[in-house]
Image (tube, rainbow, N blue to C red):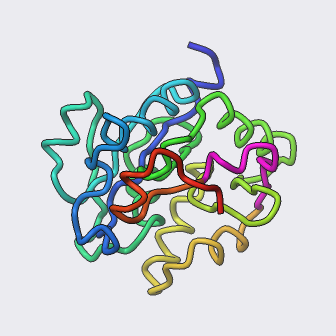
Amino acid sequence: MTEERANITGAVLAGGRARRMGGEDKGLMVYRGRPLVAYALDALSLIAGTILINANRNQEEYARFGYPVIEDLTDSFDGPLAGLLSAMRSAQTEYVLTVPCDCPQVDGALLGRLYTSLLDEDAELCAAHDGNRLHPVFLIAKCSLIGDLADYLASGERKVETWLKSNQLALADFSDHPEMFVNINTREELTNTTIPCS
C-alpha cells in the first residue's frame, strides 16, 4: 500500500433520506446492473487504504459489500457533514475522503487530485470544482478538524460550504471531467442509459 493510501480513509456518504427517490435508500438502488454505492466503493478502493460506508438505514445490506458501516452520531439526518464527522471519529488515518453514493461516474484515479491539491496548497480541506461550481461532498479533510466540525454541527449549522470556507480550503480542478459529478436523484435518471451533464 502506498503512503498516500495509508493516510486516507475513504467514506461513502449514503446516509440521506433520498426524498426525490420516494424515500428509498438511494445507494442500494440499481443503476446499469449494480447498486449505486458499488461505483463509489470501487473508486475509493483506488485511493483509500481504509473504506467506510456512512448509512443510517439498511446497515445490514450495506455491510454485505464487505466494509464497516457507520451511522451518524444523531438520528436526525443532519446531512453530509454529519457523515463526515462520523467518519472522522472512526478513522485511524490523518485524512478522510468523502464521495456521495449517487454519482456512478466517479473515477478513483481522478480522486487523487483532492489529496495532491490539499498538499500543494498546504490546506486543511480540499473540495472538487468542475470549473463552474463547487462539489463540496467530493472532499478530503484533515481529521484534526474533528473538534471544529463537531462544534459547527452542535451550533445547529448544516451548510457544507459555509463550514469549508471557515477553514483553510483548497480547490481541486476537475474542469476536464465534469461528468464525474453527474448524480442520480430520480427514478427517471436511474433508468436513463445516459445522463446529460448539467
Query: Splitting the image into 4 quarters, where does residue 26 fall?
Result: bottom left
Would you say residue 123 sits in the magenta stretch? no
What residue is at 62 percent from the left and 73 percent from the top?
A: 163
What x and y, as percent, mark residue 7?
A: 59, 30
Q: How many marks?
A: 0
What residue is at 53 percent from the left and 30 percent from the top?
A: 48
Above-or-below relation of 24 to 141: below
Quadrant, the N terminus:
top right
Residue 121 located left or right of residue 168: right
What x and y, as percent, mark residue 68?
A: 28, 37
Magenta region: which residues?
Answer: 169-181
Residue lying farthest right? 121
What residue is at 43 percent from the left and 80 percent from the top?
A: 154
Above-or-below relation of 164 to 59: below
Would you say residue 170 sits in the magenta stretch? yes
Residue lying farthest top? 1
Residue 26 located left or right of residue 138: left
